[in-house]
Image (cartoon, rainbow, N blue to C red):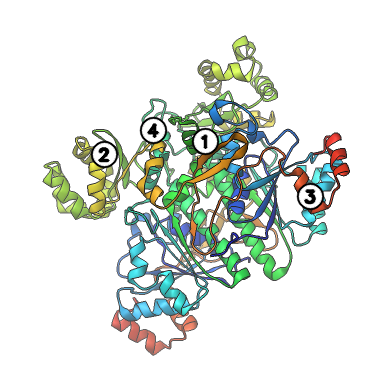
Amino acid sequence: MSERGALAGLRVLDLTDLKGHLCARLLADMGADVIKIEPPGGDPARRVGPFVDDQPHRDRSLFFWFYNLNKRSLTLDLGHPEGAAILRRLAEGADVVIESFRPGDLARMGLGWNVLHELNPALVLCSIAPFGQNGPYSGYEADDSVLTALAGMLYVNGFPDTAPVRPLGLQSYHSASYYAAIATMCALLARDSSGEGQWIDLSMQEATASAVEHVAAGFFGTGEIERRRGTLHWSRFFRIGRCRDGYLMHCTLGDWTSLVEWVNGDGKAQDLTTPEWEDVAKRRQDAEHLFDVLDEWVKDYSRDELLERAQLLRLPYASVRNPEDLFNDEQLLARGYFHEVEHPELGRTFRYPGSPYLFTGSQWRVTRRPPLVGEHTGEVLSAELGMSAQELAALAAGGVV
Amino acid sequence: MALEGVRILDFTWVVAGPVATRILADQGAEVIKIERGDKDATSVMGPRRIGLQGELHRNKRSAAINMANPRGLELARRLAAISDLVMDNFSARVMRMWAMDYASLAKIKPDIICISMSGLGHTGPRCNYVSYGPTLQALAGFTRLMADARGEPAGYGYSYADMAGGYSGALAALIALWHRKRTGRGQFVDLSQFEALVSLAGPALLDISVNGRTQEPPGWRSQEAPAAPHGAYRCRPWGDDDDRWIVIAVRSQPEWERFAGAIGDPPWTTDPKFRTLYLRMRNREELDAHVARWAATQAAEAAMELLRNAGIAAGVALNGADLAADPHLAERGFFAQVKLPDNSSTRLTGVPMRLSATPGSVRTVAPEVGEDNDYILGELLGLGRAERAELIAEGAVWG
């Protein structure tokens, strides 16, 4: 097992706002040295709740914490010529710059691709923007909810007769950030043979459209428009059911014989014992009736009792749980999913969710808690750029850092 | 392309695994799918070359190798020996049963990278649970929090878990490749799709663990910077389509002023109870009713145009047909038009990341099962025609 993460030695400058925070975090988690460049006063995400003990403060935002674990923080006013000059010097020694400014803003600050590429031909620049760097919409405003609408993701959630239900959890930002991290790694691998960096144009609308598997694809494949179907999944093999003490997710893709024998043993099979239901196509075709029968069957079961038995029969049923349940989930606990992270300045330790993957040869780990605003400004500028205490004081006095 | 020269032996199926290998194939990796040729368990997902299946399997190759046959298994092991990565999304026992797990393969290819994208991981008491994207969303708490206005779970129209699994699988593959290039060492990555999904609920989970707060479905309450108005508002029907909605997010005082101006400064916009963002959030139901009445008189696209030009975040809830016709995506050439072997053509979702020097692309349409048997067994493994015929006769390969 490597003592250092798989990406140890990579230097990343993270200029993103909350649209791209996750991208640099994914790299930081695997050992890259990520320096978050924040405007003086702190990143806007520090003003987003929830906050520790509900006390709003720029160093208490749980929203900021989650997306900025394992990063260092440097405050720098990029709109100030001296701030931009410092960024250029840092870029000379960096492998990656990730940004989510409005298209054109980076160039206006004297930090555009041409400038950075000339300074450091091996640098990878990853630009994340709502609609990409060019095209007729590239100057328009958007947030996560607007992007889910314009990606076809929103339209298919909820019930047919009422308003679409908003996707949970900033899925546009997350999809864009994952694709941006993937693209960055591809560019770094390409650099191994070419020696040259490149510029990545990541459109959040495109990334989000790619994250819905059946909307565009369904239209291209069948000419049909996918609509909202309530709790029935578009594949027609899943629907939410209600049992005695909560909700569960039915699934009719498991072994049909096992399922129908069980239901029949409870005297609730109605017409499901006829052989035609053995055909998966029939189960898709008449999903509404099938799930109505199964709803009648599950309603007197307790959720856990039903699920344990279903999984013993290898039927892919699941409970519809509350997120609070995750902290008692025996599978997550057994795998050491949660991590205790110490915040010395608060004198407390907090439990963070862990990694999307377990690397057995180069682990994911928490190397540092999320940074306080500008916590590493002095450290980075003196160690990386050799600045003296007087120079630092002058920059601070000028509002640059 | 960035991943030219990278070969991936791909045992994944359904959605999450194929999304991961599709992302890598788009960037030039040679992805060899190993599939069974006797029954296509995923045919319920539609025809192979178009729609969802067409998108999942484009740019890949397919060999129909029978893993239940000892000589079939031997072929797969020989392919692993000339591959950089082996990827699967089975539960833990399957690859072990075939002696295709990391420990076994590292003996014949010491720097092999194995990425297993199982539902719940390779260890722990539930490692053999069977799952799909929609069931993982339910387990992870996402489904419960996506409730409609009545608070009832309103489900997901799509499979976010499959995407979370697929993206993290692709990223894990690239990070492991990077690590191997620097250290010469391969490794095993145990990716639980469940954990990949849970890891995206971050701020809500911290709110639970730090503040002990029970999470409620957020609805249109902001999940990022606060906004009001913020919601989906039904617009005037377009022809016989009365399912037209616009999403609007007004996040600041200047945006509120521009919003009011853009919709013609109706009297309610100067009502003191909507004067500040705080007040607009507090009186959001009444505010939403006003905005809804305005939206009901507007065509969705025209309202979007109007608001966007005033610098407001606004977007129509596009359906599949709208998306296919979206002028911006068209201008950027996002959707790929590909030719099928019968000379008809189809469209596919394109490559959602643009690398200036090594752009990915849609190069080949999805192969039918076993379509590349000759290339894979002949060119890659050097088997002659007679040997290939013998393997088919023995049932090691489906011809």
Q: Are marks 4 and 1 on the same chain?
A: no
Determine which of the numbered discs, if any, sits on residue A303 in the image.
Answer: 2
**Dot 1: chain letter:** B
Q: Nearer the viewer, mark 3 or mark 1?
A: 3
Q: Count the numbered circles shown.
A: 4
The spot of residue A158 in percent (x, y) is: 41, 34
| Circle 4 residue | A159
Residue B393 sits above or below residue A327 on the image? below
Q: CA distance from mark 3 to mark 2?
A: 56 Å
Circles 3 and 2, Cβ within 8 Å, touching? The answer is no
Viewer-side residue, B109 vs B135: B109
Q: Earlier in the sequence, mark 2 or mark 4?
A: 4
| Circle 1 residue | B317
Q: CA distance from mark 3 to mark 1?
A: 33 Å
Q: Secondary structure at mark 3?
A: loop
Q: Secondary structure at mark 1?
A: loop
